[in-house]
Image (cartoon, coloured by chain):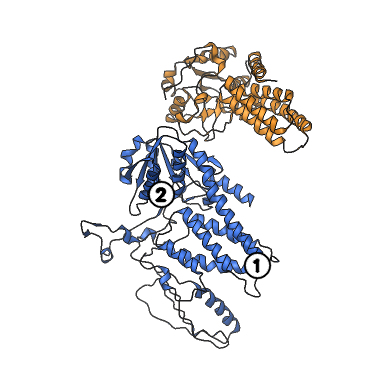
Chain colours: A blue, B orange
Amino acid sequence: SKTLFFISFEPFRGGLDCATVEPLFYCSVSSDLEEKRIPLPSNSQSLQSCTVTVFILFLQIPLRSDYGYKVSLFSHLHQYSRKAPLTQQISIPATVIHPSIVRLGLQYSQGIVAGSNARSVALLHAFKQVIQDYSTPPNEELPRDLVNKLKPYISFLNQCRPLSASMGNAIKYIKKEISNIPSQCKEEEAKKKLLLCIDNYVNEKITLAAKAISKCAIDKISDGDVILVYGCSSLVNHILCEAFEKQRKFRVIVVDSRPRLEGREALRRLVKRGIRCTYVLISAVSYILPEVSKVFLGAHALLANGYVMSRVGTSQIALVAKAYNVPVLVCCETYKFCERVQTDSFVSNELDDPDDLIVTREGKTQLADWQSVKSLGLLNLVYDVTPPDFVDLVITELGMIPCTSVPVVLRVKNVDQ
Amino acid sequence: MDEGELVEYFRTQMSQDPDVASAVAAIRSLLEFLKRDQSETILGLRENLTKAIGRLQEADSSVAVSSGGELFLRFISLTSLENPDLSQCRNVMIERGELFLKKISLSRGKVAKLCHTFIKDGAKILTHSSSRVVLKVLESAAADKKRFTVYVTESQPDSAGKLMADKLRRLNIPVTVVLDAAVGYIMEKVDLVIVGAEGVVESGGIINKIGTYQMAVCSKAHNKPFYVVAESFKFVRLYPLNQQDVPHRFKVSSFKCASCLLIPPPIS
């Protein structure tokens, strides 16, 4: 059970004049609650100073409230509604959060920027903008101050939509680069260096990696193949388009699922190139699998125990493909490898807006008032986890590795850094 | 040394010593090629070596020659970073090459020493076709005064299993030749299965004589341990997803079996 606390800052003696500040701190509430006003003791000097720091931290980011009834297995996760974006609750001037970050947050929460690679690239571009507009305040050092400046942005973006593993790795990289800037470096030089670092990261880890992966993967596509893909993975689409350019004769089966229906985007891209495609929903996958010779899947992240975290439905397809002895290939860049270990999809996942599951057919909307039914919960999961026994091969820019070699790659990367 | 001479050298190596592994013979020939090579730059040397390896692979298309050649090339690229002077570099390469060759010639003995402890007294062993490494393993187990019986599959179309049985009889090991089709029948009687390998692939699997996969599936079904003995130079940079994914040239017989009928490729 959660308790609510409003921190209302009465102007206290000797401290800052905060009469102009509005209470901005709220979290999810239980309905039966009483308000308690606790006067801040203003005689202790240390208490004043620590309340000042607390005040600064809490000023930054409003917390988004959960929406609707959460299924008990997933009650530790957040469930937000798309109709209540975090940006509406920001009443503070945008000097605290950079406008490009606000825009990015909105794009994430509304699903305008979606997909692991797209989100990371958008994040890095927004950070480039932040760095360009940044100026070191007096008596502060750029490395420490810039990293502190980024913290509220990151928590804001996390509130808009939980960070993906690729975004987490990108942020770790940027923070490391910023803290590695020597303190005697001039601001202009430092900023130029950081922008160059970010450009290199995007180029190496995403663009060039995609090229290297397609080169490897094209060897695995032979003439007459029937390839099954699920949802819309930018990397898998890239590979298939490249293979088609290299005159490989194959056809593609695109499997799609509600409520996102991302497969339609993949279908559109492939058909535009002229590749022969078939489109089915995930319920038909066991019907279509006897025709399939290979399954190509994208990944959101590869965990340290060899499990593949990807769009919900991926593990189902891998399971059925295994039952039909169809090889499953996962294509993933190494910047998506993360140190986390997970064996099930409950412990850490993302819950999307439950209202997305409501569908109107022939003028009738069945679940329109689902909130009024106390025993009904709508669950819109985003990710699931596939065990390594169902995956035959992982194609990365370092080459083709079995799923169990992921910790080796992580170890090698750590040694490099 | 031109490419014709290289292939001749390779063939003589193979015929002089029937017991030598084809990868070892390939590396020996490549070392000889390196000694006689006249190129002026390291890049030229590499190019010549790559062409030579290609020519050897045409002569003998087995997996072992391919893996041996690649190993040699990789080993050359590592040495070339140290010395700027070409003749010094070449001498270092040749010295290291000889050392490398000596080490891998001993590898079969090392495998036999490690493996014979898996064979307990009174064991019944099943093996497939004729493998010199398996023969060495069984030889060292017999020398260790262990009592065991061996079942060998006949392994058509070249009946190599019968050759294996002859060799084992000469070592006074009780051996029975079974039909390829009788693997499922005999599996309940045996305690363990030991086979050799032509090549070990990146996914951990092996490429071997036709009929090995059936034996492996059968032994899994009966929960019998299935051991593979292979030297380290047989590790090849391939990742096949299924039977079809193995390159075709590795599936047809190498020139060693020129005397027997040329095996037509399996229906794809």
Q: Is A364 drawn above or below residue B43 in the view shown?
A: below
Q: Nearer the viewer, mark 2 or mark 1?
A: 1
Q: Which residue lies at the image location 49% right of the left edge and 83% below the top edge?
A: A9
Q: Residues within 10 Å of mark 2 (few under 14, many from 20)?
A: many
Mark 2 residue type: Cys
| Residue A288 in sight here | yes
Does label 2 or label 1 sit earlier along the sequence? 1
Q: Quadrant of residue A106?
A: bottom left
Q: Which residue is mark 1?
A: A187
Q: Is B111 drawn above or below residue A373 in the view shown?
A: above
Q: Chain of mark 1?
A: A
Q: CB of mark 2 within 8 Å of CB of mark 1?
A: no
Q: Is B4 drawn above or below residue A15 in the view shown?
A: above
Q: Chain of mark 2?
A: A
Q: Is A75 drawn above or below residue B74 in the view shown?
A: below
Q: Which residue is mark 2?
A: A232
Image position of A261 (left or right of A117)? left
